[in-house]
Amino acid sequence: MNPIRLKPDPESPSGCRGAGLRRSTFSRTFFPSGSLLCASVALFLVAACATEKKTTAEDVRTLVDHGHYGQALDMAAQASADAPDDKALQDLHREASVAYLLEQGRRLTFDDKDEEAIVAMRSALEIDPQSKEVRDWLDKTNRKLALHHLNLALEEHAKDEIPQALGNYEQALVYMPGDKDALIGRELCQHILQHRLELGSNYFDEGVRALSDFWLEQAHSRFAYSHKYRPGEERTQGRKTQVEKLLADQRISTGETFEKHQMFGAARNEYRIAVLLDPSNDDARASVARVQNELDVGSLLDRAGMHVVRGQFEEASKLVEEAGAKTVEQHDEVEGALATIREGRFAKEYDDALVLEHDYRFEEAASKYDDLLSKTQFYKDVIARRDTLNEYIRLAADLYGKAAAETAPDKKLEYLNQIEVFWPEYKDVRAQIAELAKPAQPG
């Protein structure tokens, strides 16, 4: 490889590309240590030329010593270009190129850009195949890369990622061909893969036999194992897909049975499994959405039921109406929920009327019973209770009128006692009875 030439960098007068290269990099540069050229005055111009070369070499050395590799390379390249026949300057240019490339490689490997670093170091080695320093750095970088790939291979091997581990073992051997750990690891991976190929073939055959007997679950597991050990085998994948479609059809059939009996949760699970087995099955996807809608309806009806228990009939009615608008398969359940709400309302009104009746507020209770009967023709014993209360109201008024018209205390008391039997809190009956029951005062 020819020495490299850099274009001057106007932004950096020093042309600095790095620092730290030892002076030994230039130990083979041809610099004259003695001056036999001064023996003849006639060779003054030649001596002057040698002095110029020595000055250039010293300047380049100084730049290298201070880490200005780019500027040193520029100077050496310019000097060699000006004197293409001068071997010393050409050697100077080559050594400056080697120094520059080695420094670039070292900086790249410090930044963990080892692949690029190797390219730079190999370029330096092509210029100077005898450079021990370049060879040492190239060996270090190769070892670094080899250990990186070896560590990756060991991690992948531990996770049972055998194909990936084999690739990294082989890559480690590219950089460190004789590494014992990489060689052993590669051999183990090759044995494992060969064994798995044989296992994959056996599992495939077992899957075919199970499929022929329509043992679909067993066939699916065997083809899955075969695919695991032979992931690139198209025939295995084809058989596995075939079984999965058949299993998906089975799941759909089971789901339809569950759905028919309104076991929507179980049906949804079957349809979901069918989708997992055969993602292209549009019927399974539609079925999942359909039963999910019915499950949402069921949830609305359950919430409505809780509101009924709490006596919150308006909230319950809204939820049931929403469920009725959504459902396709649960209209009977929606009607049942509406009936439950109506029954709950009737029960509430009935209980309210009973409270009034037990509190001897017969007129209000009878009115409540009338309201309830206006909404439903028959409900429990409402008609009998209403009629009884109306009779109590009529009889109490009649007896009270007779008592008011009676002048004889005993007769008056008799009428009032009859009222107290069935309506003790009627008007002032108790007060009149108490007054009439007082013993007569002596004259």
Image: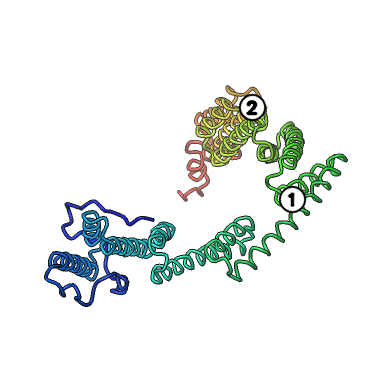
Q: Is residue 315 left or right of residue 22?
A: right
Q: Is residue 218 left or right of residue 36?
A: right
Element type where label 1 sits in the image:
helix
Q: Are marks 2 and 1 in contact (CB under 8 Å)?
A: no
How crowded pointer 2 is (Cα within 10 Å; few <14, some 14-19, many 20+) is rated as: some
Find disc 1 in the rendering and name its residue.
225
Element type where label 2 sits in the image:
helix
Image-quadrant location for residue 340: top right
Tell me the distance, in whole angstroms, between the alpha carbons under discs 2 and 1: 52 Å
**Circle 1: residue type:** Tyr
Q: Nearer the viewer, residue 132 or 138?
A: 132
Find disc 2 in the rendering and name its residue.
335
Q: Residue at x 46, y 68 (%)?
A: 139
Mark found first going from the N terminus, 2 or 1: 1
Q: Nearer the viewer, residue 147 or 225?
A: 147
Q: Residue at x 23, y 51 (%)?
A: 7
Q: Is residue 302 above or below residue 162?
A: above
Q: Nearer the viewer, residue 393 or 352?
A: 352
